Amino acid sequence: MTASGIPIILVIDDECAVLESIGMYLDDCGYRAVTAGNGRDGLAAFVQHKPDVVFTDLRMPEMDGLAVIREIKALSPDTPVAVISGTGVVADAIQAVKLGAWDYITKPVVDLAEIDLVVRRALEHRDLRNEVAALRDGMLAVKLRRPEAFASIVSADTAMQRIFQYIEAVAPSTQPVLVSGPTGTGKELVARAIHAVSGRNGAFVAVNLGGLDDQMFSDTLFGHVRGAFTGADRLREGMLAQAAGGTLFLDEIGELAETSQVRLLRLLQENEYFPLGSDTPRKSQARIVAATNRDLAERVKEGGFRQDLYFRLCTHQVTIPPLAARRGDIPLLLTSFVAEAAAMFGKTVPQVPAELSRYLASYEFPGNVRELKSMVFDAVAQHSRGPLGKDSFLQAMGRCAAPEMSPASAALAGVPGEGDSHFPTLKEAEEKLIRRALELAGGNQGVAARYLGITRQGLNKTLNRWKQRGSVESPGAGA
């Protein structure tokens, strides 16, 4: 494969007309064709260019095709080799298959599209084999091979580390990746990590599909030729051309209009597209990574998303958990965002009180990491001296209504479920909930109050009442 990520196809044949026609066709398909007129030159070209797929004739001077296959398989057992030869050589064809030939095409090649089909199947098979090997190695590995690619995603969470390992396994594949997760979890950062690990030297190009009608979608991705529509006074290359040899990131894929879904499906199936106003297809070598915060499987059931497109997109799937599912990352994210915000505002990095992380851990973060970052930047912007204050955080968290009591919370409070006979008094339920909240908060009354959905003053008043009563020992105290 070239440095730009374009597959190299080697064609070995002693017929000049065959070499020229197949070579030109492969170049038109977006591959890089390398040709050789005999087996010996073909073997030298294989060593020099390290092609992704090889086509070879069987009957050639100096070194026949069987010898070529034998030598190539000795040098690189996993490289797919397809045979192109005339009829009447059945015995040789059988021998070629025994030596490891991937496929067989008879001369004359009437439909050159058969060549492209063999190449695509061979590349898909290679990617799948490499992915399985990478997954196996990743399961055995305890460390990431490319940790620097994930530096922008601050996390020590076990589930996130497993996601990073999966990304390392599937990143070299040319197949699409679907990244899903709630709003604000960092899906574009994950897409950029996939691009970084893939080793593709082309650009990372991001497109937000939300609100694009079919013409805007086609013009943005595929571009247009001069005169395609009113105002199209010059040629425009689309985002696909900009992402050649790289990664095209399609955000909010769940919002795509039905007609645009058909166009995208063709791109994924055929690796080709038509610029607006053009009848000539163009080949794309861009890797597609799509992202959504919607349940696409549910959208398929509702009829809002094509099932065939969904299956094409989810060849590889990455699901990012919400911040509430990885609360252990909050202190790391808090420290990172405070430093980033201080640098942006030209301020000294303020001290972060230890209790602030505990306050934040009691919050559900419907906006996830993006919401936490906004809170931090707002707090740092207002900060003047001393430790970073928590008032702006509490105000932001206070805008979110307290959640209803969950079954687990009800059980903690002693509220009876179906079939239970004992119904607790209000005093018993209050005591159980307060004790449990203080236990979860490590004795910090402010954090416990957040768990309970009341003010710190209200909790302190209740604890003081318990002390004055003397019949029940105060469950705890804290700043």
Image: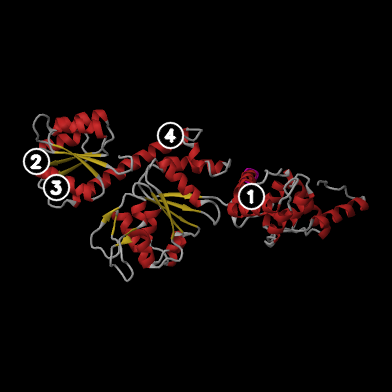
Q: Work out how far the residue at label 3 is from the one at label 2, CA to CA, in angstroms.
A: 10 Å
At label 3, the amino acid type is Ser
The residue under label 3 is 21
Considering only vertical position in the picture, is 401 above or below 324?
below
Q: Earlier in the sequence, mark 2 or mark 1?
A: 2
| Relative side of 338 to 38, left or right | right
By secondary structure, the bulk of the magenta-drawn segment is best described as helix
| Relative side of 215 to 389, left or right | left
Label 3 residue SS: helix
Label 4 residue SS: helix
The residue under label 1 is 345
At label 1, the amino acid type is Phe
Give the class, few, some or many, for how many residues have Cα within 10 Å of label 4's Cα (few <14, many ≥20): few
Q: Earlier in the sequence, mark 4 or mark 3?
A: 3
Q: Which mark is residue 137?
A: 4
Q: Which mark is residue 15?
A: 2
Q: Earlier in the sequence, mark 4 or mark 1?
A: 4
Assess whether residue 459 is covered by the magenta stretch: no
Q: Residue at x 22, y 47 (%)?
A: 27
Q: Work out how far the residue at label 3 is from the one at label 1, CA to CA, in angstroms.
A: 61 Å
- The span picked out in magenta is 330-334
Give the number of the mark in front: 4 or 2.
Answer: 2
**Would residue 170 be seen by someone viewing this image from the given angle?**
yes
Give the number of the mark in front: 4 or 1.
Answer: 1
Considering only vertical position in the picture, is 31 above or below 270?
above
Give the number of the mark in front: 2 or 1.
Answer: 1
Q: Please identify the quadrant where the N terminus is shown.
A: top left
At label 2, the amino acid type is Glu
Residue 189 position in % (x across, y down) = 50, 48
Residue with the most extreme bottom position: 230
Q: Earlier in the sequence, mark 3 or mark 2?
A: 2
Q: Work out how far the residue at label 4 is from the one at label 2, CA to CA, in angstroms.
A: 44 Å
